[in-house]
Amino acid sequence: MSIAEAHAPAAVSDPTLMTLAQAAAAIRARQISSVEATKAALARIEQWQPRLNCFIKVDEEGALKQAAALDAELARGRIHGALHGVPLAHKDMYYRAGRISTCGSEIRRHWRANITATVLTRLDEAGAVDLGALNMAEFAAGPTGHNEHFGHCRNPFNPAHMTGGSSSGSGASVAARLVYGALGSDTGGSIRLPAAACGVIGLKATYGRVSRYGAMARAWSLDHVGPLTRTAEDCALIMAVIAGHDVNDGAASHEPVPDFTAGLRDSIKGLRIGIVTETDDAPVDPEVRAAVDASVAVLRSLGAETVPVRLPRLMEWYSFADTISKCEGATIHAQWLRERPQDYANHIRTRLEAGLVLPATRYIEALSARGRHLAEFLETVMADVDVLHCPAIPIPIPTIAETDVDGTGEAVLALVGRITQYTRPFNFLGIPTISVPCGFTANGLPVAFQVAAKPFAEPLVLRVAHAYQEATDYHERVPTL
Amino acid sequence: MPISSRFVVDTAKAFQDVDFSEARAGELALEVERLNTAVRTAAQSLDFDAEPAAFFAVLAGRTS
């Protein structure tokens, strides 16, 4: 059964509450029009935006024009692709020729791109509607969702709490049902952190699986483009559109693109899941641990076999990634750091500065270690398991005030440092990793686990996430105004 | 020898033409020291022939 057939659309009074897969099927079956879906999204954005600040710009006129054109084409029997008429929005760092791309910064507040990102071109060709530009951490350089220039993005489950970053608007808008899906980018966790903090799916695919052309660079060697969605199935639908080689991205993989939706409904019975053992240098809060452990029990109940695995090099990978990120970030920003340092938020500038004085040899050693560490990881940790399972954010989602690093103090820096402990190492390894919502802590904020797999095994992590979501309903909890 | 704030100030100025206050340089010295030590220590076990492009070969499954 195809995804489209699986979603013979039910009557839904509020189209914004459909999943992407349901909305796409409903539009295709002409049960709702793209204009109706877009208007419903815009109405919900109008309600929620003052509370969440997840959009930097809403393009109401452009989106409705695009939706009307897609409806007209559908009436003539032409379907663009799997996302025909479905309203999405993306982190404000995906360039569209002629459009302002702020990258969440003061420096690029009025900067217009002269190229269009490959992923946006592919989404356009698949018929997606673009609702506008989503808030983000300045230059994608923060894990919390703070933004001094455009205002902090706020968590739909409690606006006093952080969204996670850097794809803050992507996480918040998908969770609040303002859009059916959104692109984020992930250099140290920036897709998976907001996905985890806001209770949605976020996939960092294998390095090179999705083109980075026309996406603002944070750190070339670690940057990954990917979707945030309500369900794993929705994520598979977007991946099917955006994945694949691109001659414009020198790091884009030639690996054949699989059908991301084909095996989604397959059983996970017999699948071997390595459960990452907690270590002293990456402790997990007991409340988060309980929810993550409960997700393991669900996966076991679905027939998966679980075995404990150790990641003794977790913090080593973290240091390698941190070094690469700082050196490449400092290189990208060197001129502006010299000429207009005052235009950066303190906490962003200070994230980049160490890269100005780290020796080139350390940077190249970190890059040179990557192949050996990935090989060793595959030959040891992954030798006896199909996927890994570990927490996404190891602490309950803190407030915006608690993570205000400009308030500074070692305690705040240490807290923020813990946020990326379980995400950044997977950027170093470059392997596919998905964040899956698995409960709520006592403060009412989401908890999530990650599933990681061997290179290019995105269908497998999607299958595990889908099986889990079929057995649970955390992803169906809709935040209320 | 630990990295000093003076070293950070001088290096940043000489190589990057960036000015740091002594206080900020002190914070950076600790950060650079931590990363420099961590990577240098871990890199001691790298083969003579290790190079960045090996990552892409492993990623694509072309390990020897």
Image (cartoon, rainbow, N blue to C red):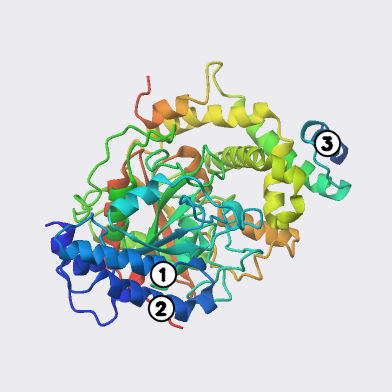
Q: Secondary structure at mark 3?
A: helix
* Residue A299 visible: no
Q: Are marks 1 and 3 on the same chain?
A: no
State left or right for residue A427 relative to residue B59: right
Where residue A344 sits, quadrant-wise, is bottom right
Identify the subunit bearing mark 2: A
Q: Amino acid at mark 2?
A: Arg
Q: Which residue is mark 2?
A: A44
Mark 1 and mark 2: Cα distance apart in space: 16 Å
Tell me the mark number nearer the camera, choosing from 3 and 2.
2
Contact between marks 1 and 2 (CB within 8 A): the answer is: no
Q: Which residue is mark 1?
A: A61
A251 relative to A60, above or below: above
Q: Measuring from the top left, give residue A114's x and y in whole percent.
A: 50, 46
Q: Amino acid at mark 3?
A: Lys
Q: Measuring from the top left, give residue A187's x and y in whole percent.
A: 52, 47
Q: Amino acid at mark 1?
A: Glu
Identify the subunit bearing mark 1: A
A207 relative to A73, above or below: above
Q: Are marks 3 and 2 on the same chain?
A: no
Q: Nearer the viewer, residue A267 or A225?
A: A225
Taking the spot 60% from the left edge, 40% from the top edge, the residue there is A319
Q: Secondary structure at mark 2?
A: helix
Other-residue count near label 1 (Cα within 10 Å), few / some / many at <14 / 14–19 / ≥20: few
Give the number of the disc on residue B13.
3
State left or right for residue A151 relative to residue A432: right
Q: Measuring from the top left, give residue A414's x and y in whole percent.
A: 67, 57
- The quadrant the N terminus of chain A occupies is bottom left
Give the number of the disc on residue A200.
none
A38 relative to A335, above or below: below
Mark 1 and mark 3: Cα distance apart in space: 49 Å
